Image (tube, grey):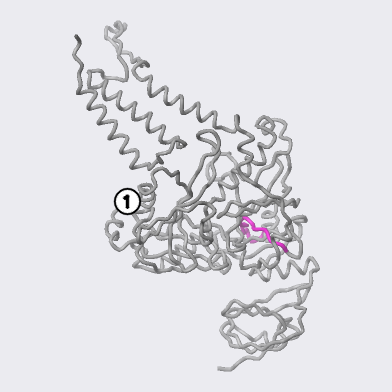
Amino acid sequence: MKKVKIVPYLVGAVSALAFAALCLYVFCPAFNVHNPVLWIIGALTLFVFILIERLLKGERDFGRVNISKKKGNGKKYSKFKFDVKYYIAPIALICLIALIGAFSSTFFNATAYSQILKVTESDFTTDLSESVGTDSIALMDTASAQMLGDREIGALSDVVSQFNVSYDYIQIDYNGKPVKVSALEYAGFFKWMNNKNNGVKGYVTVDPVSMSASFKESEGMKYVPSAYFSENARRYIWTKYPTLMLENLHFEIDENGKPYYIASIIEKTVALFGGKTVSGCVVLDPVTGETVKYDLKDIPQWVDVVFSGDLICQQYNWHGMLQNGYMNSLFAKKGCKQVTTYTSDEDTFDETPVSDFGYVAKDGDIWIYTGVTSVNGDSSNIGFLLANERTGESRYYSVAGADEKSAMAAAEGEVQEKGYQASFPSLINIDGNPTYIMVLKDSGGLVKLYAAVNVEQYNIVTTAATQSECIEKYKSILGIETEDVTNETKDVTVKIDSVKYIDIDGNTYIYLIDTENNIYKAKASENEKMLLLKDGDTVKLSCSGSKIVSCEKVEK
């Protein structure tokens, strides 16, 4: 009777378990049958077990080595040959994963994928009323936010020496206004070792309207993504909810400025691995480590980003491309449409279209906006998509016009001698006219101008130093009355933060912006004494709405 050697099997099992434990600790995969990463770790663990067991039995390769006959020089040479029979189990498991993945794809489930995102058609002028003012428009891109945030932290020597500002700036609605936020992060392992007892002490907020950044101190945040071992936020949440598939871990603050980390709970709705959507979120208090799991319908309103913009765009593309079947999306393409895309310039070998979108703060939530184009169309939009990042609610507006890239090019062409670059625009309603509004930046990333471009006639373009000035000029070009209709006047005393001048139809207007960001205006020819005003002056104004009837400087 052949004696069975137990040691190779025992050592192989221990090695495989150690390998699996390391993978679980590093990758933190959900213990969920819908998670393909868990299946792959299982297959690799089985492979490691067989490999170690074979080596300990005296085999020095993956299968066996055949010693062939001598070559012409008289030397023997070895030839590797992979012995499949020893590895049939892990190979079969890998094949099964690939097979399940194929049957979970859009090829076999086009209809199911097209129905994941529920899209309702809505009215543009009703949903985007002019009551959603310029304070709700978030035009700043992440690169500009990073620059302002780094500049703010750079002035704090005790902070910049130990922490960096995370590049993961998140657009949120903070007390009714759009704000970008990003937490500080440890500047490496040794900085974490030096500061982990006190934690991360704050975060940065960037106002995309005023283009200003500020550092906010907070209680020490211990459980953050840049921490190590058990204090790493992703790993910490995984230990609390090991069966949940979590993505989109990011930083937010509530209406009182208290910091939190939010992770979206992912659900696969098609076959085993396909049809990704969101079913809720986990909220982590990084100071105390307290976690709360919310179903989608119960998520508090201060949480803004549960459905990421990229996921919404992907789901809409499934909706727009697959409604008439997978083969139609490849060949006939009847009725196919998708969100606005561009080709990444960062990798010349990557020609995969990437979705792009802007943000609007509306009804206490952040909504992403992007154009919708026909797959067979030219550089134009057939409509727009507005989607709520907290609830996933998506609305489609059938408004034809120029696409965002054409509008950006039109704005850049208006000041082509300056070489400014336009940011991705947002969509606003100006007296029933769908309008793109965007910022123009110089080569250093500084915002220099605002631009408004008519969606239906993108040769109608205006630029100005502020959003309000830009919109006033735009209204003037369209012939929209901008004067206040009220005859009531009121007297106010304000301190001037800045004085702006703008030419409209050959007339120079003076704009006074006070320290509370209120704007007052007057025609220069009717109020010539106002030309002597400067920043920091205190004035007594008699106003009809925002129109200045009389102005008197208050002497100090």
Question: Which x, y percent locates residue 28?
Answer: 37, 43
Residue placed most toward the observer, 50 or 523? 50
Q: Quadrant of the N terminus?
A: top left
Q: Which residues are magenta?
A: 416-429
Q: In the shown orientation, is residue 149 left or right of residue 45?
A: right
- For label 1, the SS is loop
Question: Which x, y percent locates residue 90?
Answer: 38, 24
Which residue is at the far right?
Answer: 479
Q: In the shown orientation, is residue 5 left or right of residue 502?
A: left
Residue 291 among magenta residues: no
Above or below residue 426? Residue 101 is above
Name the residue: 30% across, 63% down. 198
The quarter holding residue 161 reads bottom left
Above or below residue 137? Residue 91 is above
- Crowding at dot 1, Cα within 10 Å, few <14 / some 14-19 / many 20+, comes out as some
**Residue hosting label 1:** 228
Residue 418 among magenta residues: yes
Residue placed most toward the observer, 73 or 488? 488
Question: Which x, y percent locates residue 282?
Answer: 45, 53
Q: In the shown orientation, is residue 58 left or right of residue 549?
A: left
Residue placed most toward the observer, 456 or 259? 259
Name the residue: 39% across, 67% down. 218
What's under tag 1, amino acid-wise? Tyr
Name the residue: 48% across, 59% down. 146
Above or below residue 51? Residue 33 is below
The quarter holding residue 23 reads top left
Q: Quadrant of the C terminus?
A: bottom right
Which residue is at the far bottom?
Answer: 555
Q: How many marks?
A: 1
The quarter holding residue 515 reads bottom right
